[in-house]
Image (cartoon, rainbow, N blue to C red):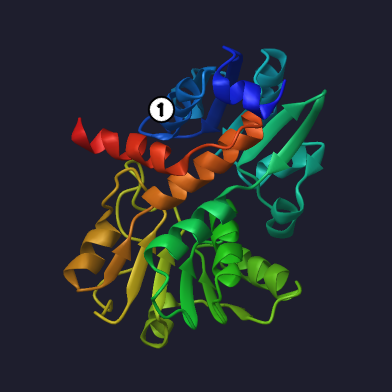
């Protein structure tokens, strides 16, 4: 079966899923299903939300095993499992290995292959919507699985000094050391107090779950944000987080997590199906939620 056959529509069934916590508002399932239908696939995308599963709550390993046995083509993995999933796959792509986190697992010929499309998602979103913004020094909030992917993307798009803060300082130090050990020209540093460096940075990226519907609030106090800062929040449900709202009120240029969500989804869709997705069509599906 060729990619051309799939584009003409063969009716092949593709079953995939999303594993995480608090993922009810996720727009990813519909983006995948609508794009699959447009390409002639019977595309089914299921949420596997551990917050909604009664006791005994299955482990991540249990859910991966169940999805594999049920004939899933693969699964996306989101908060808080992106790092834990690495140990549960047979092979990890080079980009995912470099950051120690995966968000996509493909089941292929009895093997589990881990990928990370978050790097692509963030980098592509930034290039399309913030390309003209200065990015010599950037403050990254969050050093978990999503933070690791965003850090890699920031270095890829030309950040020369990356400052990383996390509620667990050891995670920030570990990620800083990991990135510094790579073949990169940029300076990467873990910092203890993000407010102490805010005056020296061009932009701020929130890669923590703070701001999600079930994690309300802002990742840092917002009073020190100034009009010269740009601010990106990778959270997209809600689309306008409290952090973005405060940054907008301060006159900052802001970018929501919508673009990253769309482009990472397009990358995962191709990994699951072998067919390139149309990111613009997926963005239209994403934006369609706001019209409801």
Q: Is residue 234 visible?
A: yes
- The picture places residue 261, in percent across and down from the top left corner, at 45, 45
Q: How many marks?
A: 1
Q: Is 98 situated above or below 9?
A: below
Percent of width and height locating residue 272: 64, 30
Relative height, residue 272 to residue 44 (above, below): below
Q: Which residue is mark 1?
A: 30
In the image, residue 100 above or below residue 272: below
- In which quadrant of the rendered image does the C terminus lie? top left
Q: Is residue 144 visible in this depiction of the protein?
A: no
In the displayed structure, does residue 223 sit left or right of residue 159?
left
- In this rendered view, identify the residue nearer to me: 291 or 49: 291
Q: Is residue 60 above or below residue 181?
A: above
* Mark 1 surroundings: few (<14), some (14-19) or many (≥20) residues within 10 A: some
| Nearer to me, 211 or 15 | 15
Residue drawn at the location 44% of the way across and 57% of the way down: 125
Q: Is residue 70 left or right of residue 138?
A: right
Residue found 72% across the figure and 20% down from its top = 1
Residue plotted at (38% across, 79% down): 195
Can you give x and y, in whole percent of width and height, for residue 112 in the image?
76, 32
Instruction: Name the residue nearer the viewer: 67 or 172.
Output: 67
Q: Position of residue 268 (x, y in %)?
A: 58, 38
Residue 260 versus residue 49: which sits nearer the camera? 260
Assign a secondary structure to mark 1.
helix
Left or right position of 63 against 291 = right
Q: Residue furthest left?
A: 249
């Amino acid at each position: 079966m060729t990619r051309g056959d799939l584009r003409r529509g063969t009716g092949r069934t593709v079953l995939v899923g999303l594993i995480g916590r608090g993922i009810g508002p996720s727009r990813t399932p519909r983006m995948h299903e609508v794009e699959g239908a447009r390409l002639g696939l019977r595309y089914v995308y299921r949420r596997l939300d551990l917050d909604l599963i009664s006791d005994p709550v299955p482990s991540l390993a249990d859910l991966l095993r169940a999805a594999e046995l049920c004939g899933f083509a693969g699964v996306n993995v989101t908060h808080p499992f992106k790092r834990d999933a690495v140990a549960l796959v047979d092979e990890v792509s080079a980009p995912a290995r470099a950051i120690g986190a995966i968000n996509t697992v493909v089941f292929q010929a009895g093997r589990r292959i881990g990928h990370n499309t978050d790097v692509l998602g963030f980098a592509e979103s930034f290039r399309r919507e913030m390309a003209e913004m200065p990015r010599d020094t950037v403050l990254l909030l969050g050093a978990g699985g999503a933070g690791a992917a965003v850090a890699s993307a920031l270095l890829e798009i030309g950040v020369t000094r990356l400052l990383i803060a996390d509620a667990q300082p050891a995670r920030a130090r570990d990620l800083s050391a990991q990135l510094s050990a790579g073949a990169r020209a940029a300076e990467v540093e873990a910092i203890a107090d993000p407010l102490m460096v805010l005056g020296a940075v061009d932009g701020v990226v929130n890669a923590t779950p703070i701001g999600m519907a079930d994690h309300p609030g802002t990742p840092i106090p917002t009073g020190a944000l100034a009009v010269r800062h740009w601010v990106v929040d990778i959270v997209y449900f809600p689309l306008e987080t409290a952090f973005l709202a405060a940054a907008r009120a301060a006159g900052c240029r802001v970018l929501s997590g919508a673009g990253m969500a769309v482009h990472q989804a397009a990358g995962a869709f191709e990994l699951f199906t072998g067919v390139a997705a149309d990111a613009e069509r997926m963005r239209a599906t994403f934006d369609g939620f706001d019209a409801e």
